Image (cartoon, helix red, strand yellow):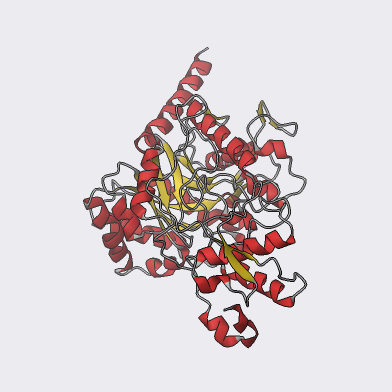
Amino acid sequence: MARPVASCLAKAAAVLLLVLSTAWWSDGVGVNWGTQLSNPLPASTMVRLLKDNGFDKVKLFDAEDSILSALRGSGIQVMVGIPNDMLADLAGGGKAAEHWVKANVSKHVSDGVDIRFVAVGNEPFLTTFNGTYLNTTFPAMQSVQAALAKAGLGGRVKVTVALNADVYQSPTGKPSDGDFRDDIRGLMLTIVQFLASSGAPFVANVYPFISLYADPNFPLDYAFFQGSSSAVVDGAVTYENTFDANHDTLVAALRRNGFPDVPIVVGEVGWPTDGDANANPEYARQFNQDLLDHIASGKGTPLRPGVPVDAYLFSLVDEDQKSIRPGNFERHWGVFYYDGQPKYPLSLRGGDGAGTLVPAKGVEYLKKRWCVLKRDADLADQKVGDSVSYACVQADCTSLGYKTSCSGLDPRGNVSYAFNSYYQSNDQDEQACNFGGLATTTAVNPSAGTCRVHVVRAGSVLVLLRDSLMREESNSLAWLG
């Protein structure tokens, strides 16, 4: 009997160690705050939105001064990101890291911003980057860590890196066979040793939706949390959802390489609401609510039972300027629309928790005016097609397409949607609703069914590229007005 008791005590001690090692940051619900949108709400409004909805942690992709200043005294724990294009400079040593820490961490910590982590790089080892950041990521992490220590913040602010889940894998598909990707295994072990020595977490971005999007044969029910007809049997454990299986593949990889106690933070996880046949508010609500219920239960995962899952939802608001190279859904991950309006009910504390999402306060809009195709315009006119192409390059038309929210529009409705998107992105400038005389403004909302044709908020600061150079370079587009 002694051996089983000792084994149970050892497992209990390991669980306790993991819980204690993460307790100082893992309480509460986190969310990613991206800023790639043409009409961002003021940072102060966004911070109030976070607080009103009970978000306790936020993950940023860059150290924007206005955002960090707005977080002062909020009590919200912050993970600050460093973009990949800065890694080379920081890896070079010298004063670059010290200057960055002074301007973006020390300054704000002393002002009352609760910065807990610096994420050096964002998914730098994606295979699509062709090794661009393989030689700079870890040296940059070391430089930032040294700069934090020099600033007296080494014990307070931990250095990590936000990694895509493709850095680990299982050759058999069973989580227990997890290991790090062969081509970067040595580098990953170096980074994990660094994390373990400082008590920093391994940050991994997990996207069941992407698994579904990338593989037409991926079982839909396995992407959610309600049980699956395609469960993965791994010894005595049966995985009925891809989130737990993915998480435990990482746990197994850490164990296999001698790091069983490194904390794990899911840096990004969520479900988009548009831009693909499987991206809609119903699926997004189901996935995110089930995930939050999972977190609230405190049950952990099969390979880390009793260790609460620590995760940051992706994301806070839609970002209409994100690259759509991965897919049109990239601009629709928000649990809120760009203007801080909730997309669907969601209880952050789990299904039994009180309340649901509340909208941003104090948001003002421009006049209820929309830009639409004139009734007498001929759809066969070549200028119509050219105008739509132009509008959709300059603005966002990702809600148009097969089984998207606006897929039910007729051809004229599609054109009007494109025109209005460009018009609103230009703050309802009169010249932005011209298109060679094809368009006109209206006070009648053209929204229909699930298709939401928006009005831009007032006081926006546009960051869309203007069209002056394009007009100079192409006389054929001069009629766009």
The residue positioned 34% from the left and 36% from the top of the image is 24
Could you tell me residue 460's position as x and y percent? 41, 61
The residue positioned 49% from the left and 50% from the top of the image is 317
The residue positioned 60% from the left and 37% from the top of the image is 287
**Count of numbered circles in the view:** 0
The residue positioned 47% from the left and 65% from the top of the image is 427
Left of 388 or right of it: where is 53? left
Placement of the C terminus among the 4 image quadrants: bottom right
- Determine if residue 131 is in view: no
Outermost residue, top side: 1
Q: In which quarter of the image is residue 63?
A: bottom left
Residue 245 vs 375, above or below: the answer is above
Q: Nearer the viewer, residue 476 or 205?
A: 476
Q: Nearer the viewer, residue 49 or 134?
A: 49
Could you tell me residue 374's position as x and y percent? 66, 67
Q: In which quarter of the image is residue 302?
A: top right
Q: Nearer the viewer, residue 65 or 39?
A: 39
Left of 117 or right of it: where is 35? right
Residue 457 vs 475, above or below: the answer is above
Could you tell me residue 480's position as x and y percent? 60, 78
Residue 373 vs 29, above or below: the answer is below
Could you tell me residue 23's position as x and y percent? 37, 33
Left of 147 or right of it: where is 121? right
- Determine if residue 481 is in view: yes
